[in-house]
Amino acid sequence: MYKKIVWPICILVLFLFSGLALANDLGSLFEQVEKLKIERHGYILGAALNQGQMETAAANPVDAASPDTFKFKDKNLYVVAQKTSHRVLVIYEQLEAASQQKIQDLVGDLYMNFDDPTVLAHDKVVYWAYTKKGKITSIEFDTARQNKKQLNILATVKFISDINIMETVKEPATGQVYYIISSDPILKLFKDT
């Protein structure tokens, strides 16, 4: 009888401690990402929303995909945050029918915000990647890839366009474009908690 009672209690305690460990890991990841200061229009990935941002969130809600998050729109920018901590999980912007000039302007703005990208691909993808130490340069990325060394990427800024960014396209060319600022390790851990 004693074993029948103790075993379920041990399992319950194990689950509680593993849940606390995941929560501590998530908190630690949020802090690491926040230190990178990856910011867009005042929103910092991993940081808690300030009072003004919380007011914007309350005034401009959007349906969130997870019951543990809330989502809102600030002009053209969408922000997803954790309900309990109000920390920013995702920042993104999407344009449905952008001209090539608008796409170039947006990429230029991102360059000004994040400096030279880590990867440029097919004139349609621009990618900035960050480790705990900061942004990975294109040289560091290429060297790691050639040496088959795994980079511990903590956060990314991904820009994807339907049409070429720089190469001239036939007029009137419009396409869908978006960029997303997120941390895959945070999102994975968040999903697991």
Image (spheres, rainbow, N blue to C red):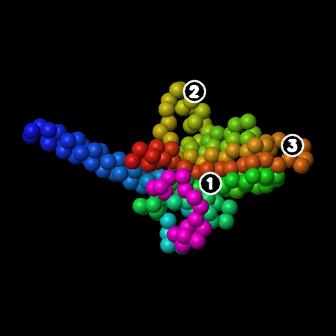
How many dots with numbers? 3
State the residue at coordinates (73%, 41%).
Answer: 124
Which residue sits at x=27%, y=48%? 16
The earlier-in-sequence mark between 2 and 1 is 1
**Is 147 included in the stretch rendered in magenta?**
no
Mark 2 or 1: in front is: 1
Which residue shows up at 64% across the image and 39% down it? 119
Q: Which amino acid does the dot numbered 1 rest on?
A: Tyr
Quadrant (top left/top right/bottom left/bottom right) for the N terminus:
top left
Q: Position of residue 64 (x, y in %)?
A: 55, 56
Which sits earlier in the primary sequence, circle 3 or circle 2?
2
In front of the other: 108 or 23 = 23
Q: Residue furthest top?
A: 147
Report how far apart the C-alphas of labels 3 and 2 lie in the structure: 33 Å
Please state if 61 lies on the left or on the right of 125 as rendered. left
Q: Is residue 49 above or below residue 132?
A: below
Image spot of residue 103 (x, y percent) = 76, 51
Q: Write the start and end of the magenta stretch as one range.
A: 54-69
Q: Which mark is residue 169?
A: 3
Position of 140 relative to 97 (above/below): above
> Where residue 35 sits in the image (x, y, percent)?
46, 56
Residue matched to label 2:
146
Q: Which image quadrant is residue 57 in?
A: bottom right
Query: Residue 41 at what x, y percent from top left?
Result: 62, 63
Q: Name the residue carrying label 1.
A: 92
Q: Which label was assigned to residue 57? A: none
